[in-house]
Amino acid sequence: MTVPPSHAAAIEFDHVSFALNGRPLLRDLSFSVQPGETMVLLGRSGSGKTTALKLVNRLLLATTGEVRVNGQPTTAWDPIRLRRSVGYVIQDGGLFPHFTVERNIALVPRIENWPQDRVTARVHELLDTVGLSRDLAARYPSQLSGGQRQRVGVARALAADPPILILDEAFGALDPITRSEMQKEFHALQHRLRKAVIFVTHDLREALLLADRILLLEAGGVIVNLPAAEFSRSDNALVRAYVEAFAGSPQPQ
Amino acid sequence: MNFWQFMVNNRQQVFDLTLEHITLAGVATLLAALVGIPLGILITRVPKLSKAVLGGANIIQTIPSLALFGFLLPAPWIGERAGRLAILALALYALLPLIRNTYAGIQNVDPAVVEAGRAMGLTDKQLLFQVELPLASGVIVAGVRIAMVVSIGLATIAAAIGAGGLGEFIFRGLAMVNNQVILAGAIPAALLALFADFVLGRLERRLGTLPQRS
């Protein structure tokens, strides 16, 4: 095992392709995410965004090329260790319906055998972080609103303080007002926590709000990879199509 | 002599046979659960085996029960004692609902929840014991319930090979053409089945329903 150089990117895709049953889903994908940076993978359904995300925590393995996390190829990581150091947030939280909020959030600390008092303190701290009342700790996911469930999902991903966060359409199941709230809060949270973040979405406005860089995917290939500030000015045809599709709808305020 | 008089006069024997009946059906269901639930888990992990295992358990169910007792008679150790033989036969019948429900219960756990668990870094074992089995427990208990009720019913036939249980009264009543005696076996057996159904049904509902919005 090689010692990762100190300047290593948190996440690095190096000419990564992925095929399932001979059908290519990702083609020659290369990008990197630095600590503290938020990379948004933007694209429509079926463009390969979620597939790319699953390569990060080794739910999938690249067919060719290499995905490196903290400088080390995911193939060289113990998958369990890797996944516990990558916080994962999915649509509607993906919470365990038979666990209380407290147990859901404490999932990784518990399996990592943290002492009980440290687990409890951490759960309380995280409930504060994501703006939830501590009174909710004993509730079950079915007893929460969609926004609350999503907050618990974020708290669970942050529980063991992983250096990397990956979010898959994390706010996609929420009503527009809650969604907008969550986006702003997440933005503020990321400003404080400085994780390396990959955020998958098909919503350009969400991408522009959260991203440091935006990578536009189409049919498994990279169309552009630009700083968020420059994205809307790109003259790439697909970017234009995206921008125009979203310009048609009024800005939420 | 009416039914109640018969029951009162023979209360000791009614009690003994009921106990024997519970033992036959209970031990058989327990054995079947010890084999069937792990087998059900196994075929969710090794899907290639699922057809063979479920098919095998299905075929056992199609064997007429009296014939199954007969087939097992020459088996060493098992065949020596009627009780052992009856328990084995009953357990074989109870396998199908246990395997099938364990399999279906785990298969029906929301795949998004399982994937979230895997992505959090749960090991296969943690995923099974903390996520899949708890979420499938209602369906698995439903399988135990079916197995138990079927075993209690089938155990009446065990008397035909001298394994005892409430079937003793039924077969004796048939031979004597005496309905009171038949009922002395049939009614307690039916009550046992209803009782088991009720208790396991409550457990199943408790495990199967997640907390609702308060």
Image: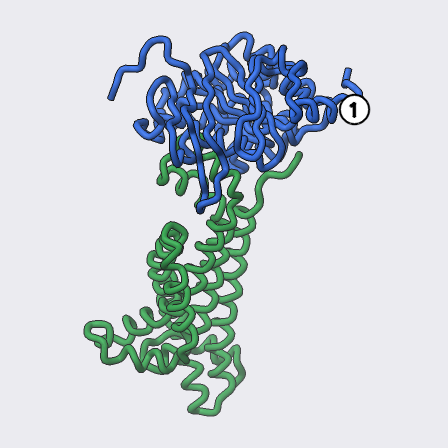
Chain colours: A blue, B green
Amino acid type indicated by mark 1: Ser
Disc 1 crowd, CA 10 A, few/some/many (<14, 14-19, 20+): few
In the image, residue A7 above or below residue B157: above
In the image, residue A124 above or below residue B209: above
User: In terms of secondary structure, where does tag 1 sit?
Assistant: loop
Q: For the C terminus of chain A, which image quadrant?
A: top right
Q: Nearer the viewer, residue B6 or B134?
A: B134
Q: Residue A235 at what x, y percent from top left?
A: 66, 18
The answer to whether residue A224 is left or right of residue A179 is left
The answer to whether residue A116 is left or right of residue A166 is left
Quick one: which residue is furthest to the left in this view?
A: B76
Q: Residue B159 at what x, y percent from top left?
A: 36, 79
The answer to whether residue B28 is left or right of residue A38 is left
Q: Residue at x 48, y 60 (%)?
A: B145
Instruction: Name the residue that disc number 1 marks.
Output: A249
Tally of marks:
1
Q: Nearer the viewer, residue B212 or A16?
A: A16
Residue A152 seen: no
Q: Residue B133 at what x, y percent from top left?
A: 44, 45
Q: Residue at x 38, y 55 (%)?
A: B43
Q: For the N terminus of chain A, which image quadrant?
A: top left
Q: Residue B26 at what x, y percent from top left?
A: 38, 63
Residue B164 seen: yes
